[in-house]
Amino acid sequence: LSLCSSHCCRPRNTKAEVKGTACRAMPPKANTFSSTGAKKRARAWQQAEKDGDDDESERPSESFLKLQRELEDREKVEVRNAKRQAYLDELVARTEGRSKTIGTLLYLDVELRKQTSSMAKLQSFITTGRLIFEVFDDLMPRTGEAMIRLVKATGAQASGKEKTNASHSFFNSTFSYVVPGFLCRGGTSVTEENAAARTSFPGIGEAVWDGLKLTNRGVLALATEKTNEFIISFKPLEELDGQRMVFGRVCPASNELLDEIEAAGAADGEPSKSLVIVGGGVIDKEQPITKYVRPVVRPKEVTEHERRTKGFTDYRKFTFT
């Protein structure tokens, strides 16, 4: 018997034919081992070689990688320089009073005493004023705390509440060097052998002080690290940048008194008046600064008749406007 998908079993030698039907031939099965069959699968080593060739064609060159690293390093340097410049600009804004950050505010009461030839033994002509200034205790913590401690001791000694060593306060200290258009120097001079141990300011400079400069009028800086003396600039002093430790600035409310101090100076630095610090204190941040502002009070001219009628002993109370 022969089998067909379209016919039933029938004898091999029969001659009968089924009308209307035809045997559908089955397609030959492909030989996987013949050359005409399906494509052979690549061996593992052949595939590895092909993948390696593709990776080498896509891998960047060594010069390109070097250039990319240089560009990344340059961008890092530019970002670091931009941050450094912004920080230096902020320091300049602090000394010029343009910054939103404000340190501790202090004040010193100053008397400008001038003696006349006819009344040298009786009474001085006295001009009084208050010097209000800011210390950068957030940038210069050790120097700022030392200045605050000195000013507090000055106020306590002026009010009679405490007896402090002269080298530990500004009470009765003077502005000993005043040059118009340059600077003035005030505070207590420590001349003992152990001056470095008695001074209130730290002898070692702080890390940030090289960025603070004497960029404008009214900048406050240390005269030396071995004394309690400080200097106030009357103009920008670029020649002293890096040589003096800047730690504060005079507030605009005291510009009038600063003008009086400058006017009392001379080219040789010897002031024409005795500039004496007679008090001081710390300004409360919760209180308005206008509460602590004191205008400059100048003596008025007294006529010869007033001198005779009032007397010389009570002259001082008639010298203020």
Image: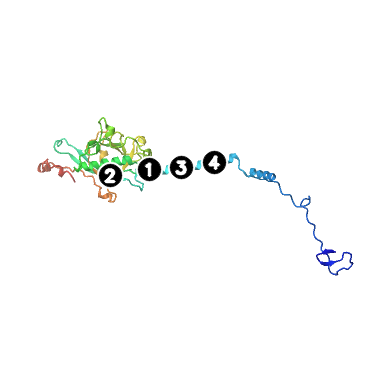
Rendering quarter of residue 50: top right
Rendering quarter of residue 174: top left
The residue identified by callout 2 is 106
User: For the residues marked 4 and 2, what is the alpha-carbon distance in whole angstroms?
Assistant: 52 Å
The amino acid at mark 3 is Arg
Can residue 219 be seen here? The reply is no
Q: Nearer the viewer, residue 195 or 288?
A: 195
Looking at the picture, does residue 87 appear above or below residue 177?
below
The amino acid at mark 2 is Leu
The residue identified by callout 3 is 80
Q: Residue furthest bottom?
A: 19
Q: Which of 119 and 79 is in front in this view?
A: 79
The residue identified by callout 4 is 69
Q: What element carries label 4?
A: helix
48 left or right of 117 in image: right
The amino acid at mark 4 is Arg
The residue identified by callout 1 is 91
